[in-house]
Image (cartoon, rainbow, N blue to C red):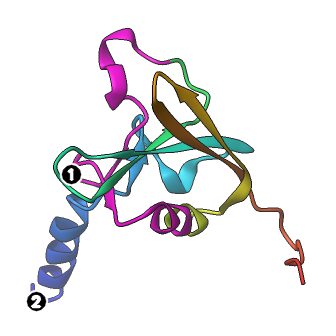
Amino acid sequence: MKQWIPALLACLFTAGARAQSVNGVPLKDLDMEYIDMTVDVRPLTTKLRLVLDIGQETKLLDGNRYGRVKDGKGEELLFHSRIDALNFMDRFGYELHLAYAVTESNSTEHHYILRRKKAGRNPAP
């Protein structure tokens, strides 16, 4: 009987643990070659939220919430800076491929094209 207690506790603790996800897809399971990452500034705070375009069809009623990275509880993940967000995506096997900005109506949106890291690729000197 005593051997069942640790197994039961392990099941209870891991049942609620879920990975970070975008549009319901765990980040560890993404297999896209390229991802478009934008970072939104949250109103009334210095925190940033990460928005990923992984090539899925967007839902009209979801508006800006579609593509936001969420934790296991469904809450948006917040970042300290754009570099913090890039380092976060690096942990999931993506590296910066290209960065560009789009300016419309006195507003600039920064895009970061991420590419899945190639196995065995040597870093630049």
Q: Earlier in the sequence, mark 2 or mark 1?
A: 2
In the displayed orientation, state which residue is furthest to the top.
60
Which of the pair 44/6 is nearer the observer? 44
- Rendered position, 102 above or below 94: above
- Rendered position, 31 above or below 3: above
Please state, as top left, top right, bottom left or bottom right, where the C terminus lies in the image: bottom right
Q: What amino acid is labelled 2 in the image?
A: Lys
Q: Residue at 43% of width from left, 35% of height from top?
A: 67
The answer to whether one can see residue 32 in this image is no
Q: Residue at 28% of width from left, 54% of height from top?
A: 72
Magenta segment boundaries in residue numbering: 58-87
The answer to whether one can see residue 29 in this image is yes
- The residue indicated by pointer 1 is 73
Q: Judge depth for marks 2 and 1 and give the one in front.
A: 1
- The residue indicated by pointer 2 is 2
Numbered tag placed on residue 62 in the rendering: none
Q: Which element is circle 2 on?
A: loop
Q: Position of residue 79 (x, y in %)?
A: 35, 62
